[in-house]
Image (cartoon, grey):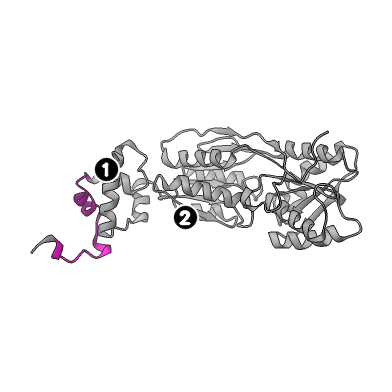
Amino acid sequence: MSRDSVDPLPRSAVTLADVARAAGVSLATASFVLSGRAGSRSSGSEATKAKVREAAADLGYVPNRHAQAMRTGRGGGIVLALGSLSDPWGVQLTAQVRDDALAHDLSTLVLADERWFEYLLGASADAALLTSIDFVEDGPQKLRRLAASTQSGLVAFSATVEPEGFDVVASTPYLAIRRAYRRLRERHERVHLLAPALRGGPGGGGSLSHPRTAAFLAAVLEHGDGTGEHLVRLTAEGSRETYLSGVDWLSSPDRPEAVICFTGYQALALQLAARQVGLSVPDDLEFLAIGDVPSDAEYFGPISYYGVDDVFARLSAVIIDRAVDREDRPGALHAFDWEFFPGTTTREES
């Protein structure tokens, strides 16, 4: 009986040894290629990797990720704890990480809530980006607990913690917010902050206790414009909610002339609201975003913003490096500086 006449093995019966045999490689090489470590030299040449993947596809091999995690300490993927799906910043970062991770046979998983601590305690990941360390209760303590466990591929987006067995990306917009206030205040009597109505946070104060709001209020006070709470406009979270609130705000007799937007998605919503009510940007309304805005979402011209140059590629590189190189190491500090990128929503400097 020829090999071609033999019924293929059930998918559940196909083992890694079957794949290695079909590809003509060692069991160790097949393991390196199919376990998310294809970037390692031990996985062989590109031709070898292609043979292993082709054999796995032909046989219908499905790796047991749970067994791999227990055996190697690798979960086969990258976790992005973003807390939300509505911010274009997170969407663009996810796309960048996904593309970079696939080259290393790594999947990408997004957590759209703040339960990253509970999730990672019960799951194994090759790397995890945690973006809300500074904004959830006991965030730094939870981070250290994870780092002390089996989670060695952590990357913390934080302005308050130092590397302790995990990498830290320090990229704080607080100085940028103060510069943004000064920039707009030179031409306007009042500069507003448009912010989402956040719940909880450090001290339980929500948006008004958020460090971004605190930086805005400090800038208002430094300029001699009072305490500044009356200049903060809160909207429900989400692009549609911000747009609807923006239409009401821009249609009111006391409409703003200059606005700093807490996030990129709020700036997009405000741009659409201004167009809806017939305001000329930047003549009737100047605004800018804290954090960049995806260019493919800017239908009415680029939005001015403060951000980090090439931030998604740089941040993705840090995460992928942590996922691929799982050797014990003390962790590193990566400082990302913010700068101003002019668009069509602010006037040219005189």
**In x, y percent, where is residue 34?**
32, 49
Depicted 168 relative to depicted 15: above or below: above
Boundaries of the magenta span: 4-26
Is residue 256 within the magenta segment? no
Check disc 2: other Cα within 10 Å, few if <14, some if 14-19, many if 20+.
few
Q: Which residue is mark 2?
A: 122
Depicted 252 relative to depicted 137: above or below: below
Residue type, label 2: Gly
Depicted 87 relative to depicted 185: above or below: below
Depicted 84 relative to depicted 37: above or below: below
Q: Answer whether residue 14 is visible to the viewer in this image.
A: yes
User: Which sits in the foreground, 213 or 45?
Assistant: 45
> Is 94 left or right of 8, judged from the image as shown?
right
Q: Identify the disc placed on residue 130.
A: none
> Is 106 left or right of 110, judged from the image as shown?
left
Residue type, label 1: Thr
Q: Which residue is mark 1?
A: 48
Mark closer to the observer (1, 2): 1
Q: Earlier in the sequence, mark 1 or mark 2?
A: 1
Check disc 1: other Cα within 10 Å, few if <14, some if 14-19, many if 20+.
some
User: Which sits in the foreground, 34 or 149?
Assistant: 34
User: Which sits in the foreground, 346 or 328?
Assistant: 346
